[in-house]
Structure formats: C-alpha cells, structure tokens
Amino acid sequence: MHFAALPRDARLAALREEVRAIERSRFAAPAGAAPCLPFGIAEVDARLAGGGLAAGLHEAAPATPAANDEAAATLFLAALAARFAMARGEGGQVLWALSRRDLFAPGLAQAGLAPDRLIYAECRGDEEVLAVMEEGVRHGSLAAVVGEVGRAAMPALRRLQLAAEEGGTAALMLRRWKKANADPLGQPSAALTRWRLACAPSAPLPHDGIGRARWHVALARQRGGPPYEWLLEAPDAEARLALPARSGDRPDRAGGAQPVAVRPSVQAA
C-alpha cells in the first residue's frame, strides 16, 4: 500500500519510526570508537542509549537552587569524572574549570575523585570556562573535563560537543542556577545526556546516625533514548553509585545490584 494511502495514525507512526532509525544511525558509535562507559548498575545502563556514557558533552543541574541539590549535582559529575579517569588507568587526569572557589576537595575524594587525578583551572566567567573546556577535550590526553557554567550559547555547546567527540573525551558540564525561576536545563543544548539531581531522604538506620545520602536522579534527555528517573544512593570513595538497599543486610551496589522498579520520566528538558 502506498504511504499516502495509509490512515493518518499509521502515517505518523511510520514517520516516527523513520526518525528514530535516522537518529540511531546518526549517533551510533563508529567502528573502532571507544565504548560507552557504564554506570555499573544494570537498571541504569539498560536505559542509556549505548549502555553507558559516550565521549561527548553531558550536562547535570540541580533540581532547585538549594545548596544541597547543587552539591548533589556536583558530586554526581565528580563521580562520573572519576569513573572516566579510572577507565584510563593510573594516569587518568580530570580538568575542572570553575569561576568561583567553592569546591571541597575532601568531598570530591569521598565521591571517588582523588586530588592526584584533579587539575583546577580558575576562570573569569562562563565564556572562559567554555573555552578552557573546549581546549581540554581537544587535547585528547585527559580522561574528562568538568566545567561549571551558568549560561552557554548553543554555538558554543555545539563546538564543545564536536570537540569532545573528536578528542574522545567526556565533557561534563555543571549547569548552575542563575535565577530562581530559570531552569538551567530549560534552554536547548547539544549535550548527549542531560541530568537533573535532587536530594532525597536517607534510609533510616537501626541506630543513631545518618544513612548513605540518596538522590532523585532524572535523565531529563538523551539522544537516541527516552528520559527516565531513578532513586540512587550517592557515590562511595570508588565512585560507585548504587540502588537503594532492599534490606539492611543486603546492599545493592553498582556492578552487582538487584532489580528494582524504575520509572520513565514524564518530561524531557
């Protein structure tokens, strides 16, 4: 039957499938390219196009301007950078470009990003952060480049994404809140993935103390796949995030987690 003769719903479905096929072929990793870096959590990696994070631009933002959500987004990127560095071996280095001195090195180390893997670049504003990130990923010797940005124009993001792909390096961008009512992920981006982080209550302990931090982690957008959301435990000193434990004596850790319910996100940024 000719395409034009199909019912309207069938034509729309066929067009959607054709667009998906084009997108999958466009963003598929080329032969010989470095494989995607998995989270090590089957329920997360199964939802990521390619089974992990490819070399390229990835963004994360706090769900609110609150300091605890911003800390969660920062530590999330620190853990990702640490995993990319560990994949490079002992010499894996991470460049972190920032315009304000608010990083806490012991906190980054607790998320797996050790001081001996980290190089800081102090910048005078967003444009300089973006320029430093682009130079860093183009060099090709770094495991990952992290940058903290409030505003970024689409042309600069496209250049950064292309440079990261060409250099085979992960560009991890922390999108800061500039105004209370301006979602950092509200503007278009060339990023392969966009993440939104919010703190969640820790699991109660059978004794006095504070349990492992938990986050609501939303994959707000990804190329070649749908959005999704999880409740995850914050990374440990080996940069391993985890699914919440099913019981007090059987923790679900990255790389050996048991299946739990996850749900698709209702909105994409």
Image (tube, rainbow, N blue to C red):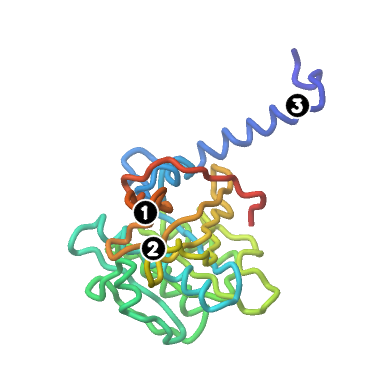
Q: Tag 3, which secondary structure? A: helix
Q: Nearer the viewer, residue 29 or 49?
A: 49
Check whether the beta carbons of the residues at disc 1 and disc 2 lie within 8 A of each other: yes
Q: Which mark is residue 206?
A: 2
Badge 2 amino acid: Pro
Badge 1 amino acid: Gly
Mark positioned earlier in the residue sequence (1 or 2): 2
Mark-to-mark CA distance, 2 and 3? 58 Å
Mark-to-mark CA distance, 1 and 2? 9 Å
- In terms of image quadrants, where is residue 256? top left
- Residue 176 x, y percent position in the rendering: 55, 74
Q: Please state if 243 lies on the left or on the right of 92 as rendered.
A: right
Q: Tag 2, which secondary structure? A: loop
From the image, tell me which residue sits under label 1. Answer: 248
Closer mark to the observer between disc 1 and disc 2: 2
Badge 3 amino acid: Arg
> From this viewpoint, is residue 241 visible?
yes
From the image, tell me which residue sits under label 3. Answer: 11
Local packing at callout 1 (Cα closer than 10 Å; few below 14, some 14-19, many 20+) is few
Check whether the beta carbons of the residues at disc 2 and disc 3 lie within 8 A of each other: no
Mark-to-mark CA distance, 1 and 3? 52 Å
Local packing at callout 3 (Cα closer than 10 Å; few below 14, some 14-19, many 20+) is some
Which corner quadrant holds the N terminus? top right
Mark positioned earlier in the residue sequence (1 or 3): 3
- In terms of image quadrants, where is residue 140? bottom left
Mark positioned earlier in the residue sequence (2 or 3): 3
Which corner quadrant holds the C terminus? bottom right
Q: Please state if 144 lies on the left or on the right of 228 as rendered.
A: left
